[in-house]
Amino acid sequence: MRTACSLALAALAALANFAPTVLAQNAEQLQISAFAISLGTTATGASAMVDMQITNWSTAAERARLIDTMIQKGPDAALRELQKLPVKGRFRLPSLMGPDPSQLRLGHDIRYAFQTPLEDGGRRIIVITDRYIGFREARNQPRTVDYPFTLMELRVNARGEGTGKASVATRITFDKKNQKIELENWSSEPVRLNEVKVSPKK
């Protein structure tokens, strides 16, 4: 499933012309919790608690470099650029049951975190991680290895409460003909994030 430029640019925290409206990317550290429900064609209805910590924020230069790399050199180069960025926090599913080949209980490093203000005094938070690919998946080279990103978008009010969505196993492409950045989601639909709560990290 592909979405057009507006969602994709939101997932990448917007291009430089949106810079005047962004929140200060300062040293504010956040603790985030949510309840994730899979809406996709794989593991439909599966749910788990999400625990996320943001300890640092991406700079405007990092944002521009990541987007420019993706547009000019493609998703493989963008993945390498993402992996070179300093760690911005940690994302994990501590209550996940059953097999965990992607090591979600242990968690993944957050490589990109950016926030922009909303009209109601709230904020939109964008998080990108490079999806863990285990030994078996790397060895067998299924189609999922072409989907190395996980993107999360959270929208919360001034009290830090809201909802969000996550696009797990995502491929980012650039449609040169229509000049659009697109997302292709392996599972056909995003993961819904309910009961999102954002608070200062203790």
Image (spheres, rainbow, N blue to C red):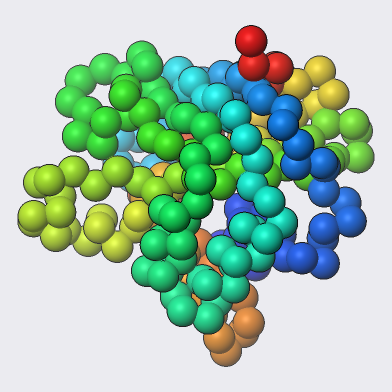
* Above or below, 191 relative to 12: above
The quadrant of the image that shows the N terminus is bottom left
The structure residue drawn at horizontal position 44% and vertical position 75%, both measured from the top left corner, is 74
Q: How many marks?
A: 0
**x and y, in percent, of residue 46 in the image:** 35, 26
- Residue furthest to the bottom: 177
User: Relative to 188, is 34 on the left or the right?
Assistant: right
**x and y, in percent, of residue 106 in the image:** 31, 24
The structure residue drawn at horizontal position 67% and vertical position 45%, both measured from the top left corner, is 114
* Above or below, 110 relative to 72: above
The structure residue drawn at horizontal position 82% and vertical position 48%, both measured from the top left corner, is 22
The structure residue drawn at horizontal position 72% and vertical position 65%, both measured from the top left corner, is 15
Q: Nearer the viewer, residue 200 or 13?
A: 200
* Above or below, 21 relative to 106: below
Q: Nearer the viewer, residue 38 or 70?
A: 70
**x and y, in percent, of residue 41 in the image:** 33, 45
User: Relative to 146, is 59 on the left or the right?
Assistant: right
Q: Is residue 197 visible?
A: no
The quadrant of the image that shows the C terminus is top right
User: Relative to 60, is 139 on the left or the right?
Assistant: left
The image quadrant of residue 154 is top right
Q: Is residue 113 visible?
A: yes
**x and y, in percent, of residue 135 in the image:** 12, 45
Q: Nearer the viewer, residue 102 or 81?
A: 81
